[in-house]
Image: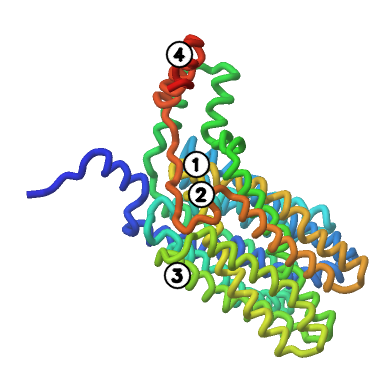
Amino acid sequence: MTKHKPKAESQSDEAEGPDGGWGWVMVGALFVSTSLVFGLMRSLGIFFVEFVQYFEESAQAISWISSTGLAAQQFFSPLGAALCNAYDTRVVVMTGGFLAGLGLILASQATSLVHLYLTMGVVSGMGWGLVFTPMVATVMAHFTRRRTLALGLAFSSIGISSFAFNPLFQLLVEMYAWRGALLILGGLSLNIVPCGALVRLKRRPKASQKVDSESSSSCAAVLRRVSSYMELPLLFERPYLTYTAAITLLNVGYFVPYFHLVAHSRQVGFSEYQAAFVMSAAGATDILGRVASGWFADLGHFRLIHLLSLWTTLAGVFIMLLPVSSLSGSYAALMVISLLYGFCSGALTSLVFAVVPMIVGVERMMGALGLLQLIESIAGLLGTPLSGLLKDITGNYVASFMVAGSFLILGTLTMATLPHYFSCTEPPAPQRRSHDDKDKSYHSELAQINSSPSDHLQDCVS
C-alpha cells in the first residue's frame, strides 16, 4: 500500500527540491557554462599584456575591458532573472550563450579600445548575465541538503578552466595572435547554447501566476508585474541589503589577482610561462577549495555565513601577501601564496550563493540572485580599474593588491552586522507572504488602529 504525504509536506518538499535526479544533469550543464563564463573571464589576463602593447594604452584603460564585461554580466543578471520568471528559462540561457560567443567573435575584429568595450564588454557581458544567474538558480532549485556541494562541484569548473585556459590562451596568442585567439574563444563560448537546451521547464511561482492573471494593462499593473518578476521588494529588507553590501565590497577586490597577477609576475622578472603557471596553480587549488568547502558546509557543523566569513577573511589576507612574496624574487614563495589564495577564493564562491536562500527563502531566490549581481556590478566596474590606476600612480602592483585584500576583509566585517549573525544555529528562512496573508495583516492593523482608547488603556493596565 502506498503512503501519501500530506499536502503541506509535499508542497514543502517540492519547493525545496528533490536533491538529485535531473538536477545532476543541470550540475553538468552549469559546470560547462561557468567554465565558459568565469573561467574564460579569469583567463583574460593573458590578453591584458597584448592589448597594452598593441593599442599603446595605459593599464587603467585596458582594465576597463574586463571590468566592463564583469559589470555587464552582473548588471544584466536581473534582466535574465525577470525574463526567466516571465517566460522560458531555456530560451533565455540559449540566447545568452549566443550573445557571449558573438561578442568575442566581433572583438577579434576590433580596431580600437572602444570596440573592445562594446564587444567583449557589453555584448559578451550581457550574454554572460543571461546565462549565469538562471543556471545557478535552476541548480539550487533541484537541491536542498546537498545544495552547497552541488554548487561546489559545478563551480569547480572555474578552477579547472583557469588551470587549463591560461597556458592554452598563451599558446593561442603565440600561434594566431590575439585576434585569432579571440575568434577561437568565441566559437568555444557557443557551447553554452546546448547547455541551456538541457534546462527543463518548471512550474512558475504562484505569485507570478497571480500577477499575470491581472488583465489590466495600466501603468500600475505593468509596474506590479515588473516588481514581481525582479523581486524588487527585497531592496527594502535590511538582511538582504546588508548581505548585498558585504558581497559588493568583497567583489571589489576578488577579481583583481585574476586580471593583474600575470602582469605583476612578469613585471618582477618572471617569464611569460612562469607567470601563466602561477594562475594555473591557483586554479588547481581553487578546484579543491570549491569541492571541499561544499562538502564540509553540507555536513552542518557550522553555519554557512560563518564559513563564508572565514574563507573571505583568509582570501583577503592572501591577496595582500601576493606582492610581498614576489618582491623577494622567490618564485616558490609566490607559488605557495597563490596556492593558498586559490583555495580560499574557491571555497567562498559556492557559499556566496548558498547563503541567499537562507536570507530570502527559496521562492524568491531567482530574483534575489539577479539583484545581487546587479548591485555587485558597481564593484566589478570599479575594482579592476582602481587597481590599474594605483599601478599607474605607484609604478607597481603592491598597492593594488593591498587595497584589493582590504576590501574583502571589510566585506567580512559588514556580514557581522547581519541579524542573528552570532547565533550558532541557522534561523528559519523567511517565506513569501501570499496576498491573502497580506490582506489579513492589513485588516488586523486596521482593527488595532480603530480600537477605542479604553481598550488600549485596559490592555496596558492588564
Q: Which residue is at 74% across, 79% downward?
A: 174
**Foreground mark, 4 or 2?**
4
Cα separation between marks 1 and 2: 7 Å
**Disc 3 crowd, CA 10 A, few/some/many (<14, 14-19, 20+):** some
Which residue is under mark 3? 296
In this view, 296 is above or below 355: below
**Foreground mark, 4 or 1?**
4
Which residue is under mark 4? 455
Which residue is under mark 2? 134
Marks 3 and 4, the one that precedes in the sequence: 3
**Quadrant in the picture for residue 22:** bottom left
Q: Which residue is at 75% across, 51% downward?
A: 118
Cα separation between marks 3 and 4: 55 Å
Cα separation between marks 4 and 2: 52 Å
Cα separation between marks 4 and 1: 50 Å
Residue projecting furthest to the front: 461
Marks 2 and 3, the one that precedes in the sequence: 2
Marks 1 and 3, the one that precedes in the sequence: 1
